[in-house]
Image: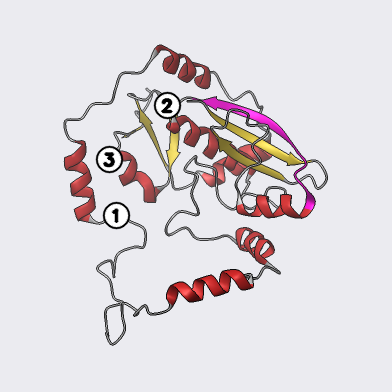
């Protein structure tokens, strides 16, 4: 199944949105970003769509999504509606993510003036009637097992379980079409970088480690320090030095 990585530009306001979809027609798909959806509701569903990449593997979606997110600085730029980098997960902000001032401003703008309808408040009230809070009459139960550990990092038990699960398992062989798509992806992104873009990418990669995955054949990528353990569990290795 093809995943399309796209850029949508509002034809009236000029606001842009970087996203991904597996829809049959990505030009008709409006995009699912919270700030972007509210912008469409306010200014109308009037936008153009540019297809950046057609990816056959989730890892390629993540690779190119992160690349363009860093290239255009979509989270901090007011020209973009994205509240987080596009990594193909389709979810909200990652656990433990520290919001930038620009992201906080976008979220504030998106929620300003919104209020819950009377029907929603009544429905929520009805659902809560008769329920006993789980911590009623208890003390100290709010202190979880993760206290003292950095929020969002996997525990030693989780790492050990993942290691045992992955031992002895091999990935399925790549299809011919998959190999061709990876080969095309390695040919280059086709967008020349400006000096300003190169500086932004360099700043974004500070503190990261270069890693690769020969089995997937994905280009070398810069991995944040807090995600290195996750990548190692999934078969990634530190990039070999070229002599």
Q: Is residue 78 left or right of residue 124?
A: right
Residue under numbered circle 1: 154
Q: 209 or 231, which lies in front?
A: 231
Report if residue 69 lies within the magenta region.
Answer: no
Q: CA distance from mark 3 to mark 1?
A: 11 Å
Q: Which residues are magenta?
A: 43-55
Crowdedness of circle 3 by 10 Å Cα count: few (<14), some, many (20+)?
some
Q: Position of residue 150 (x, y in %)?
A: 34, 63
Residue 162 falls left or right of residue 188:
left
- Find residue 12 and report its image quarter: top right
Residue 107, horizontal then vertical, whole percent: 62, 61
Examine the image and state in which quarter residue 220 appears: top left
Position of residue 51 measured from the top left corner of the image (x, y, whole percent): 64, 28
Q: CA distance from mark 1 to mark 2?
A: 25 Å
From the viewer's perspective, tell me whether residue 158 is left or right of residue 94: left
Task: Write down the residue under mark 3.
Answer: 233
Asked if the residue at tag 2 contacts the one at tag 3, i.e. Cβ–Cβ closer than 8 Å, the answer is no
Q: Are marks 3 and 1 in contact (CB under 8 Å)?
A: no
């Amino acid at each position: 199944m093809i995943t399309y990585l796209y850029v949508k530009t509002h034809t009236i306001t000029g606001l842009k949105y970087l996203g991904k979809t597996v829809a049959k027609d990505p030009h008709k798909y409006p995009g699912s970003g919270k700030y972007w959806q509210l912008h469409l509701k306010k200014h109308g569903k009037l936008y153009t769509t540019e297809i950046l990449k057609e990816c056959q593997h989730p890892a390629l979606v993540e690779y190119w999504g992160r690349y363009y997110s860093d290239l255009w600085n979509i989270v901090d730029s007011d020209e973009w509606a994205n509240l987080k980098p596009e990594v193909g997960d389709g979810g909200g902000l990652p656990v433990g993510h520290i919001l930038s001032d620009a992201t906080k401003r976008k979220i504030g703008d998106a929620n300003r003036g919104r209020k819950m309808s009377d029907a929603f408040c009544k429905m929520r009230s009805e659902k809560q009637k008769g329920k006993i809070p789980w911590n009623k009459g208890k003390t100290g139960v709010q202190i979880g097992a993760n206290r003292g550990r950095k929020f969002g990092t996997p525990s030693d038990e989780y790492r050990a379980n993942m290691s045992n699960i992955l031992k002895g398992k091999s990935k399925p062989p790549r299809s011919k079409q998959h190999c061709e798509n990876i080969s095309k992806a390695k040919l280059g992104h086709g967008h020349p970088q400006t000096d300003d873009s190169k500086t932004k990418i360099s700043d974004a990669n500070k503190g990261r480690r270069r890693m690769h995955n020969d089995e997937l054949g994905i280009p070398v990528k810069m991995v944040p320090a807090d995600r290195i353990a996750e990548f190692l569990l999934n078969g990634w290795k530190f990039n070999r030095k070229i002599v």
